[in-house]
Image: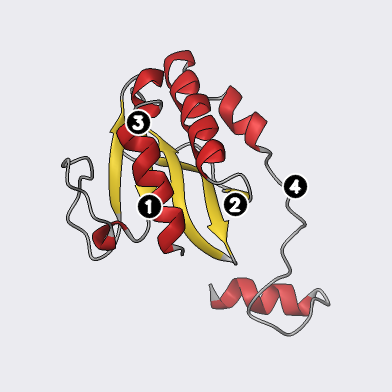
Amino acid sequence: MRSTVRSIRRRGWPPSRFLPMPPVREITLSEQVKKLPPGVRSIVQAARRTVKAAAPAAEEVTSQSAPPRSSSYMWKLIRYAVNGRDVVGIGAFTGHASLVFYRGRELDDGKGLLQGGGKDARFVTLRTPADAKRPDVARMLRKAFKLGG
């Protein structure tokens, strides 16, 4: 590494360890959704409609990530924020999608809908588009946006 930095400095680059990064083109949500398997794509689209119905004023933030290298990792696609704070996100796996509630630990879930045992976040697994349209999911989304980010 040191020899590389020395040779770069000799060629007239700035005397810094870090080289400037080239500008990165922003990846649109539609580009990311097109890369999803058709079954998962329809689940993500249904989840997105449900979130927008629950919180039409929420800011939709597209994650700038590539598909994961492993099928067991979630591909984070979209986050929804209120007043600059994330409330819920949508992620995709190879066969299903998830709604991630960033303050899920604080939500009252009398139906056992929320899964996970992390410090704060909880999630709901969506295996079909109909799962995203369930009244329990919409109710949980409204609670999350009422709680805020």
Residue 70 visible in the current orientation: no
Q: Are marks 2 and 1 in contact (CB under 8 Å)?
A: no
Mark toward the start of the polypeptide (4 vs 3): 4
Q: Which residue is mark 1?
A: 143
Q: Residue at x 69, y 83 (%)?
A: 16
- Residue at mark 2: 58
Instruction: Check if mark 2's residue and mark 3's residue have beta carbons within 8 Å.
Output: no
Find disc 3 in the rendering and name its residue. Answer: 135
Mark 4 vs 2: CB contact within 8 A: no
Separation (CA) of disc 3 from disc 1? 12 Å
* Residue 9 higher or lower than 19, as above or below: below
Secondary structure beneath label 1: helix
Dots 3, 1 in contact, CB < 8 A: no
Looking at the image, which residue is at 21% across and 49% down? Answer: 109
Query: In this rendering, is residue 144 above or below 54?
Result: below
Residue 12 as seen in the image, left or right of residue 78? right
Q: Nearer the viewer, mark 2 or mark 1?
A: 1
Whole-percent x, y for residue 121 in the image = 30, 57
Q: Which mark is residue 25?
A: 4
Q: Earlier in the sequence, mark 3 or mark 1?
A: 3
**Badge 3 amino acid:** Pro
